[in-house]
Amino acid sequence: MLSVNLLYENSELGGGKPYHDTESIVNDLGLNHLFENAAINQQARNRAVRQTIDIDNEIHKAMRKVMMTPLRTEEELKYRQAVLKDFLSNPDYTEKLYAAARRLIAAWKKHGKDEREKGNFMDNQRQLISEIKLLHIFLKSLTEIKLLSRRYKPDFNSRGLRSFCERLETEYSDEWEKKIRKVLDDLRFFCDDEESEEDIRFLKRIPRSNIVLEGAVGTGFKFSDLKLDSVSTQEKLMQKRKSTLNVFEKLSVTFSSEPMIIAKDEDSARELSELENEIAIYIFSYLQGFSRNCRDFFEALLVQSAFYAGCSNLYIRCQQIKVNTCYPTVCTKERMRFENLMELSMGLCNRKAPVGNDGDIADKMLLIVTGANQGGKSTFLRSIGVAQIMMQSGLFVAAKHYESSLFPNFFTHFVRREDTAMNSGRLDEELGRINRIVNNLGKDSLVLLNESFATTTEEEGSVISYDIIKALGEVGVKVFTVTHLLSFAKRVYGEQRADAAFLCAERMEDGTRTYKMIEGEPELTSFGLDLYDKVIGGDN
């Protein structure tokens, strides 16, 4: 059976499930900027980059779908990374494979893909004709993809792409292709009357299948007691059935150089059409399983080739804005190490490389980040979140080096713009989001908290934060939090917990923010006066 399997080795979907709250993750981490940049087609040509301005919706959907379904094992990660490296090393193949899949789906939609009834296609004669013609389109695309993959296979190193090419050669061999075309030739008698100018290109006139009827000649040389004796094609022979088809009592015959049956009234014409329909159904049944397989194959190919085309676009975009990339490696969940880690979503939005950060968080399950307002704390937390999502979908990340465990149970809880209204209902909403996170925790969970519980007082917010983070730690959840609740941060620091690390947003003596995170004890101020002097004070 034809399969794509370019995302997972042994299946199309891999049995994975999406993150619990994909909307919060996308919004909190600004991932729409990433999806949109991936969906803008860009190809390198002679060291220049050609960029279209239209967003490719298929790529956008594929990037979101795949990136919101995390990989769960190191083996899955290595498999997909290897496939991605092959696609990035062969941009022409990536572009052509995706283009072939898109053309096929577009042609399929013209034949009613989206409106196709869920019932049996054989209930409708015109739909059966459409199915036959659609199979011609499938064959044309399969042949194109097979020849394309055959040409590029020597350049592939990944097990995924090499196996994909081999399956095309074995499951859709040249011999099997010839057999399918013979059966389709036998069905042309059924499609000839429905030919359009477009159809004529591939529906050439050939000798029809041999259809034998058995019956008697009655008064006036009219046929009576007609029944189907056999249908012989290049591939199959259908023998006569036990039940007769006593429906052609009003057929008359004329003699010419080629045998011909003429239906002289509407009833006979309808009955003859029903007989042709039954014959076509019988012949097409030989290909029905193959047709279903083609549907599944091309639907999977569109999503998977669109994902890798999006990755290719994203990689070129990173090169444009001079963002370093690397393929992350897996380590224990108590450690995370990175070098020159950048917040890619912001970089794509601003069209320039952001400030990068280094970190080696060893044997820690809790990270607390404090420091100066507008010092890059939230950006730093997002850089970890974006990198983790990219890693867990098999992508490169925006860093010189990135090493982390896999956290398929990944959650974000960021302060939202409307939360700053500081009314009591907002605290309830924040606590409701925390409650939903707690109810969906599982093995290998990572929670990112950004300025959580900003809707209440320092004292109350500190108590809430301490209790929640303590409870999460007791059940083995890794937590990274950016907080303005300095009482909470000081309390945890004072406990000298071995599993906790503390970073501060660096601030120079003159108040300049470097947007670098450095190790340090939580300070009892966020240096809000710096911002006041800058915005309000001026020269006064």
Image (cartoon, rainbow, N blue to C red):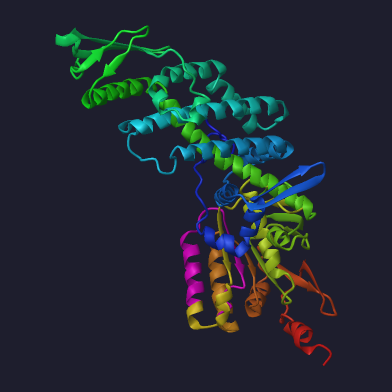
Residue, x 68% and y 38% (percent of image)? 87
Q: Position of residue 133 (x, y in %)?
A: 45, 29
Q: Residue furthest bottom?
A: 540
Residue, x 49% and y 28% (percent of image)? 199
Q: Nearer the viewer, residue 536 or 130?
A: 130
Does the stretch in magenta take in 453? Answer: yes
Q: Quadrant of residue 118?
A: top left
Is residue 275 depicted above or below 485 in this figure? Answer: above
Residue, x 47% and y 67% (percent of image)? 435
Residue, x 52% and y 35% (percent of image)? 298
Question: Is residue 401 visible from the viewing direction of this image?
Answer: no
Q: Magenta span covers which residues?
A: 427-455
Q: Position of residue 257 (x, y in %)?
A: 37, 6
Does the stretch in magenta take in 35? Answer: no
- The C terminus sits in image quarter: bottom right
Is residue 456 depicted above or below 239 in this figure? Answer: below
Q: Quadrant of residue 417?
A: bottom right
Classify residue 87 as left or right of residue 256. right
Total numbered circles? 0
Q: Position of residue 33 (x, y in %)?
A: 65, 59
Q: Nearer the viewer, residue 216 or 96?
A: 216
Q: Position of residue 169 (x, y in %)?
A: 58, 22
Classify residue 38 as left or right of residue 476. right
Is residue 148 depicted above or below 237 in this figure? Answer: below
Q: Residue furthest left?
A: 219
Is residue 363 depicted above or below 151 in this figure? Answer: below
Question: Is residue 119 visible from the viewing direction of this image?
Answer: yes
